[in-house]
Image (spheres, rainbow, N blue to C red):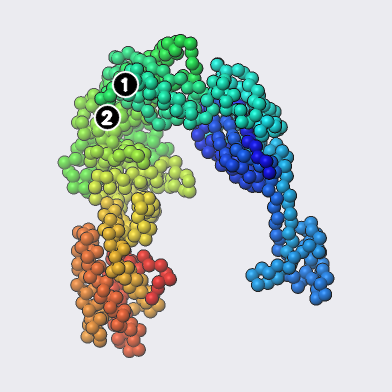
Amino acid sequence: MSAKDLLLEIGTEEIPSRFIPPVLVTLKELAEEGLKQLRLSFVGVRVYATPRRLALFVDGLADRQEDMVAAYKGPPWTSAFDSEGRATRAAEGFAKSKGVSVNDLKNVDVDGAHYAVAEVRDEGKAVGELLPGFLPSLFGKLVFPKNMYWRDPRVRFARPIRWIVALRGVELVRFTYGGVESGRVSSGHRFMGDKHVKIASADEFLDQLYDNYVVLDQDKRKQKILAGITSLEHESSGVVELDPALLEENLYLVEYPVPFIGAFDERFLEIPQEVLITSMKKNQKYFAVRTKEGKLTNSFVGVANNRAVDMRVIREGNERVLRARLEDAAFFWAEDRKRPLAQYVERLKDVVYQEKLGSMYDKVMETRKLAAWLCEELKTPDLVKLVERAAFLSKADLVTHMVDEFPELQGVMGREYALASGEDPRVALALYEQYLPKTASDGAPSDDVGAILGLAERVHVIVSCHKIGLEPTGSQDPYGLRRAARCVNEILWARKLDADVYKMVRASAQIALADDAMVERIFAFLDQRLLVQLKEKGSEYGLAKLAISVTRNRPLQVLRLIEVLNRVKDEPWFDRLATSAMRVRNILQKAGKVEGSVDPALAAKDAEKALYAQVVRLELVVEEALHEVDWERLTASLSELSPVITGFFDDVLVMDPDEKIRGNRLALLKRCNVLFEEVGDLGSLKPQKEKA
């Protein structure tokens, strides 16, 4: 078989940059899967994109499908052919259904039984017969956040398709999609390249586009951006703040990137730097520039899609646009500070939080009650006033001009306006830190005021949403309750706050007037989220479930218990103890209901006397260890029990013929089982095949 490279280019109007990265992944997966289903061998698949085109390369595509021989099992051989070897109607019907001669049926042994088997050979087709159907099938499978149609309303794409190039080597692959016929004519850069670029072959495509100022390979485009920014840094002695998300956004906004540096009036530096950075990033896609010491400067770096003869024209044009944006930001900053932040709280009554849950003001007031309760629960009464004040102001910035313009600055502006209003610095910090961690890479709050406020709000949201039936289902979680539960645990772990989340839920439910059945559902929800997080941290499933069952209402203690269990889980005594616990459970399940208590006088063997004495002694020790959450003491006690109960099973026959002795031994095991269940059912750690 000979192999040639395949090119598919979809030329469009400018596609929004955020649409492109996910669709590249999809296009590559669809192409690979589709080619495999067609039995077409290939070396590899590459995908590229700019705002005006999506491109697919298939390297080393075979010129024919691989032949396929399929075997179909028919009736038993004795039913297909009689004793003299003549075909029966069953054989003839089966052969006809598979399109083969009855004489070609084979006698095949299948798991000890003989069947008539038909082998059907499917000869591979030439690739030229398959591509005209395969390539347009990819278009409709690409999913975008929004689609448009331009001619036929039934044909939609992210943006109208203007040209299609489809070549296998030098050969044109002909098809039509959305009223556009495939050809070999592409288009260069909108301003600097030729409008009609005739592609000679798939191999020459990248070079021909580059000659027309289109850097199709996004990796090379990224290198060009970074190289240009590095050069600007050397010239300006500044350090460009390379936000990864902003870099990717710029990558898919241009076809021929030309970084440039501009400046704005120094008076705008009086505005909080987060406002400046957000305004530059959101509105103009600019990178901020800092000094080597980390101080924000009045410079910015943009990425143009045009190499002008005089780059000053581009720079000055961008500076004018940015100046207008920053004037707006300066106006918002001045206007919002004309009144103290506390005066904005009343306006929250006009902001609907959720139609069934009332206004944002109602949410704030309920969160404040829970936050104050949590301070008392955590024995931090000195923080009550600070936490209550922070909770009262927590959403006030949502009704300011600045946050209305830049919603992503909620919390940031709360902090800045609180400081400008003369609020306690810890209160101001809490207004920002209540949202932490925002993402998996974020740190937790640095102060307990913000941490307590963040905990109270998330628990309140979880309870409130469950109250009105907005529980997560499958992939649907519109109010981010899974994220809220994750953050509760992350905050408790990071700040080492030993809070009882069950009590928090009950307190919130009482404030929200929620019923007990709903509370139990929330407990199950929180337990499941905690288990998921522990597994993500590398905990074994069995140990994680064990730790949760012991003290699931206190995530900090769950984590600490797992740390201790991880240190002993591979020790021989722990494995033997888990095996013994499993045997105890299994014996009791088979025995049914066990009546009566242990009578030490009926203990005939030293091993059962020793076990009874050890259980009696450890019951108090375990109870104290659990109460004091002393996990080191707990595991040390279990290590003392392990050899004693192992010795019991080695020397004692539980199901003794004597009914009294048997009943007494079962009562002893029942008492052992109660002890095991206190520490989370150790028997569940052993697989069923190890039952004794």
Give the SS element for disc 1.
Answer: loop
Lower position in the chain sequence, tag 2 or tag 1 = 1
- Name the amino acid type tagged 1: Gly
- Where is residue 134? Give x, y as percent: 67, 39
The reply to whether residue 683 is visible in this rendering is yes
- Name the amino acid type tagged 2: Arg
Quadrant of res 687: bottom left
Choose between 588 and 267: the one closer to the eye: 267
Front disc: 2 or 1: 1
Near mark 1 (Cα within 10 A), the count class, few <14, some 14-19 or many ≥20, is many
Give me the disc on residue 177. none
- Where is residue 531? Give x, y as percent: 37, 54
Residue appearing at x 75%, y 65% in the figure: 106
Residue appearing at x 30%, y 68% in the figure: 572
- Where is residue 568? Give x, y as percent: 28, 62
Quadrant of res 211: top right
Choose between 659 and 83: the one closer to the eye: 83
The quadrant of the picture occupied by the C terminus is bottom left
- Direction front: furthest residue: 2
Give me the disc on residue 238. 1
Give me the disc on residue 415. 2
The quadrant of the picture occupied by the N terminus is top right
- Direction left: furthest residue: 382
Give the SS element for disc 2.
Answer: helix
The answer to whether 480 is drawn above or below residue 527 in the figure is above
Q: CA distance from mark 2 to mark 1?
A: 28 Å
Left or right, residue 664 beside residue 97: left
Quadrant of res 588: bottom left
The reply to whether residue 515 is visible in this rendering is no
- Where is residue 4? Give x, y as percent: 65, 37
Residue appearing at x 26%, y 54% in the figure: 560
